[in-house]
Image: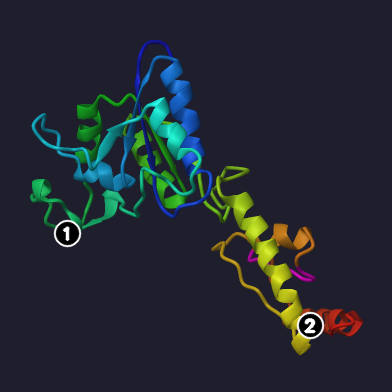
Amino acid sequence: MNGKRTIAILTGGGDVPGLNPAIRAITIRAVRDGHRVLGIRRGWAGLVDYVPDPKADNSDNVQVLTEATVNRAGRTGGTFLHTSRTRPSHLPKERVPAHLSGYTEPINDVTREVLRNLEHMGVDVLIPIGGDDTLSYGKRLNDEGLNVVAIPKTMDNDVYGTDYCIGFSTCVTRTIELTHRLRTSAGSHERFLVIEVFGRYAGFTALLPSMAGAADRCLIPEHPTDIEQLAELLTGDRNRNPSR
């Protein structure tokens, strides 16, 4: 980017390892290139609650990020900017802040106010870090003319059009660790052990741990399952296993 810009960063949805290091990397590069960096607190909620008035106290909604700030946070998990699942295009009436009392529908779209708040902050580029819900609203703002650079984050690894999401590697390693710990229990009782991992409609969180040796069989939502065939395969697996 040519010239000094104001870059805003926010994190939305669930927290995963790697968020603070991502915020740190963005901030350090931007600051060293001469740009101003803002951290939006609590995801999209910070932009909904922001009051575009010079006299208003918005310290709970936005903060200036410096190298010193992000260096301390980069060594910790989660997100020091905090997060929420607020979606400005689908804001329930009871969630509308007092200064936006004109929005009285059961579900409200306050995108116009979000854009006004970003303009009041002087934001040139917004960097949302999140999953499908967070980034789909980021696309909405991009369609409205805002410069948006999205970073995919979800342990499910299911953000469409991306190869890898922040948090996925932790999901894989933790799933493998958990599975190995449960093997002794399965063997002691001579039982089949079925582990269900999250991932909505994507099978990455089940497939990769299985490929790494954590499981004998794997079911993923992308492919239909023949229960009779699966039962035969599992029976064969059990009969061949010394622990049954």
Q: Quadrant of the N terminus?
A: top left
Q: Residue at x 83, y 79 (%)?
A: 233
In the depicted view, which residue is nearer to us: 79 or 68? 68
Q: CA distance from mark 2 to mark 1?
A: 53 Å
Name the outermost residue toward the bottom: 189
- The spot of residue 165 in percent (x, y) is 57, 45
The quadrant where residue 93 appears: bottom left
Please tell me how crowded label 2 is: few (under 14), some (14-19), or many (20+) other residues with Cα within 10 Å. Answer: some
Near-viewer residue (158 or 7):
7
Label at residue 187: 2
Q: Residue, x 48% and y 38% (percent of image)?
A: 74
Residue 118: % across, % down: 25, 32
- Quadrant where the C terminus sits is bottom right
Say whether residue 204 is visible: no
Reply above or below: 190 against 161: below
Mostly what secondary structure, the magenta segment? Answer: loop
Q: Inspect the magenta stretch and tell me whether residue 32 lies in it.
A: no
Q: Say which residue label 1 marks.
A: 93
- Report helix, strand or loop for mark 1: helix
Span of residues in magenta: 215-221
Give residue 95's position: percent from left, percent from top.
20, 57
